Amino acid sequence: MTALASIRNLTVTYRREGAEVAALRHISFDVAAGERLAIIGESGSGKSTLALAIAGLLPATAKIGGAIEWQMTEFRSSHAKDRQSFLVLNSLPLRGRDIGFVFQDPSASLDPVMPIGKQIAEVARTHLGLDWRHAYARAKILLERVRLPDPDAALRAFPHQLSGGQKQRVAIAAAIAAGPKLLIADEATSALDTIVQAEIVGLIRRLVSEDGMTLLFISHDIGLAAELAERIAVFRHGELLELGATAQVISAPRHAYTRALLDANLGLDAEPLLQRT
Ligand code: ADP
Ligand code: MG
């Protein structure tokens, strides 16, 4: 197992009204390259803090201890046209290029007054150095890939003209527009109704597989996590309680808390979930 990122003794504390809130305590685990890993736990368990720490998006009020080590060594062409000229990068990942982020509320990540085609093209321009024409061509392909009906019309549409599920499809298109290695979906389906939720989970699964991305799927819903992830990490009160293969975590959880989450989700029967994995 090659690690894409190794989280080493990560501790995050927020300063709030003079007090310190410990959001993550001494977290260590590896994110394997190409895996689908779910981070689950109830609200306030530290899931978003972990996602933001990994993406380098924590607010200035956060105090961070420990380290996140990246294995991003690769060859990248330094000029799109010059395939002979390669640059060796062994540096921190670039948010937007190497890490795509999908949030719970697509309206918050989309600009309400900019056509969605331009928003997606902008990502491709910024991170891939494409000119507008090529960036728009890429945006159209992305809208096709996320299965938006009539991609040509969708390029010119504004976010308010789309349904919640369609907006999340656009947010996903923008998140993968620069071809990131890691896709982080933080409660990306939590605001959607059950049928749309299942469609978006299916979409994420397909895109991750087509592009060979690593997925960090963050959810309070262990059932949803089990549908998508190969491994599940269970968080509570900023601590990593257990991390294991999905089948193992749901059929033989090590921690009573995981058992309780499963019971709440499934009744007492883990069989239906196991059959889906
Ligand atoms: P989750 O995503 O699992 O709901 P969070 O990472 O959002 O959990 O929150 C973990 C803890 O950190 C909670 O106690 C929350 O109140 C606190 N917290 C999160 N963000 C901030 C912030 N910006 N300032 C202060 N406290 C925060
Ligand atoms: Mg959260």
Image: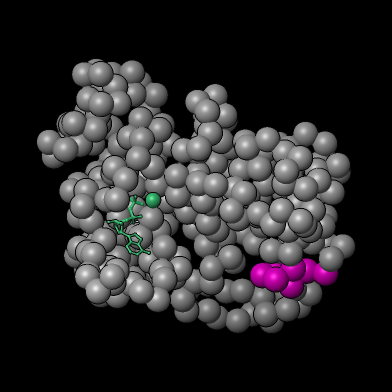
Judged left or right of residue 114, residue 72 is left
Q: Image quadrant of residue 149?
A: top right
Above or below — where is 254 with respect to 199?
A: below
Q: Residue at x 50, y 46 (%)?
A: 104
| Residue 106 or residue 173, whichever sits in front | 106
> Which region is colored magenta?
125-131
Q: Position of residue 25 (x, y in %)?
A: 20, 63
| Residue 208 can be seen, yes or no | no
Q: Is residue 128 magenta?
A: yes
Q: Position of residue 60 (x, y in %)?
A: 40, 76
Q: Position of residue 210 (x, y in %)?
A: 59, 45
Q: Residue at x 66, y 43 (%)?
A: 167
| Residue 171 or residue 35, whichever sits in front | 171
Judged left or right of residue 244, residue 146 is right
Above or below — where is 114 with respect to 205?
A: below
Q: Residue at x 22, y 25 (%)?
A: 263
**Where's the N terminus, which quadrant?**
bottom left
Q: Is residue 204 magenta?
A: no
Q: Image quadrant of residue 148?
A: top right
Above or below — where is 258 with respect to 114?
A: above
Judged left or right of residue 157, residue 93 is left
| Residue 121 or residue 162, whichever sits in front | 162
